Image: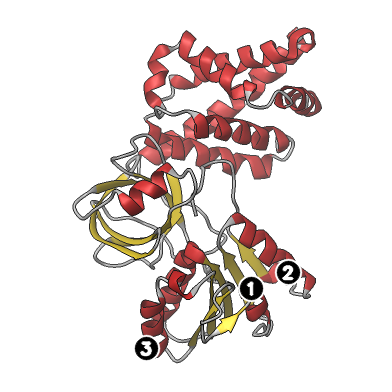
Amino acid sequence: MDTQALKGSWHLVAQSGDQVPLFFYSALFLMYPETRGLFPVSMATQRDRLVGALGHVVSNVDRVAELVPFLQQLGRDHRKFAVLSQHYPAVGQALLATLEHFLGDRWTPALAHEWTAAYGLVAKVMTEAAEESSATSPPWWEGEVILHEVRAPGIAVIRARLNYQYPFRAGQSASVSVPLRPRLWRFYSFANAPRRDNTVDLHVRVVDGGAVSTALVHGTQRGDVLKVGAPVGERLTLGPNRQGDLLLVAGGTGLAPLKALVEQVAYEGPHRSVRLFVGARTSRELYDAEALAKLEAENSWLRVVPVVSRDAFFSGEHGHVVDAALRAWRDQDVLVCGSEEMVQGSVSRLLDAGVPPARIRFDEFTTAGGREP
């Protein structure tokens, strides 16, 4: 496979920006009208995702060890969209037509052969992963909302009881869809460790233009049924080889997976010290303060430190949450979760302060799934 030819040609195509996904989906729906029902009514976010996912695949086409797990997860995840193996050839034809359109005279028989072969391998990995997954799990779980609390302006805590046993680990995330926004899925982290009653908690903040987050916070009520995809992500989980003390740095609703880790430590027994720093702009946005205070009171190994950046009347710590956390760093593992901007800034600050990269873990924002933190 000529990886340089694939990368070079995609680089040229990507320069056309938004016109690329617009042409791709127009070609797909014209050639295969039956595929339109697989997608949401509004295609704006979907167009961005296509270019991002293709860019990730092409950028890593020469790093098979990294690319294959990404494609396998993508294949498993697409089951929730009711994507079947027979849909992959349609997507392939639309992709080749798109490349030919934007490359013009640069689209040669040799390049067409390379792209056909590359897409064939991508489709093979994705379909095999989807078929393997279908033998052990449903395309999604259904969760009845049993609690919905708006804790602060634009922030809600939601608890749902899933219809089947849900095999996840503290620190993982899943894509969620709501009845008000069918065929739209966004990733959220669970705010709890696995429970015997098969319930999961979500912490959701409304984001600008976030159709799913808005529906979850303002349009969801008890009795509604959410769709929940398979759990994903390992970077914020606690494996058996990591037994040391923890320094957890949360921004906003990035608290969710870190709170889940605190629950896991509590279930396993007090064999490590945990310091949880929770950042918010104002004290009103410390939406889970009561529950965290209770956790701290029940567990001597846990210390919770709220930090606000824009509230002169707050009696606790002020400033950036990562700076407060750094003052407590004593060679612990540092786990960071929050908005993309918060995570990037915090990780940079930790590295500048001399925290070894091997000690830092954070959630990666990939183009596979349109996360609304």
For residue 320, side relative to residue 271 (left or right): right
What kind of residue is marked 1? Answer: His
The x, y position of residue 40, in whole percent, is 40, 29
Q: Quadrant of residue 4?
A: top right
Residue lying farthest to the bottom in this orientation: 300
Circle 1 sits in a helix, a strand or a loop, which is it? loop
Circle 3 sits in a helix, a strand or a loop, which is it? helix
Query: Mark 3 = which residue?
Result: 298
The x, y position of residue 317, in whole percent, is 58, 83
The x, y position of residue 22, in whole percent, is 57, 21
Q: Quadrant of residue 97?
A: top right
Q: Residue at x 45, y 69 (%)?
A: 285
Is the residue marked by circle 1 packed among few (<14), some (14-19), or many (20+) residues within 10 Å? some
Viewer can see residue 118: yes
Q: Residue at x 48, y 43 (%)?
A: 209
Circle 2 sits in a helix, a strand or a loop, which is it? helix
Q: Quadrant of residue 10?
A: top right
Q: Residue at x 60, y 27 (%)?
A: 121
Query: Mark 1 = which residue?
Result: 320
From what the image shows, is residue 27 above or below residue 362?
A: above
Per the model, the C-alpha gap separating discs 2 and 1 is 10 Å
Per the model, the C-alpha gap separating discs 1 and 3 is 27 Å
From what the image shows, is residue 74 above or below residue 200?
A: above
Query: Mark 2 = which residue?
Result: 349
What kind of residue is marked 3? Answer: Glu
Q: Nearer the viewer, mark 2 or mark 1?
A: 1
Viewer can see residue 245: no
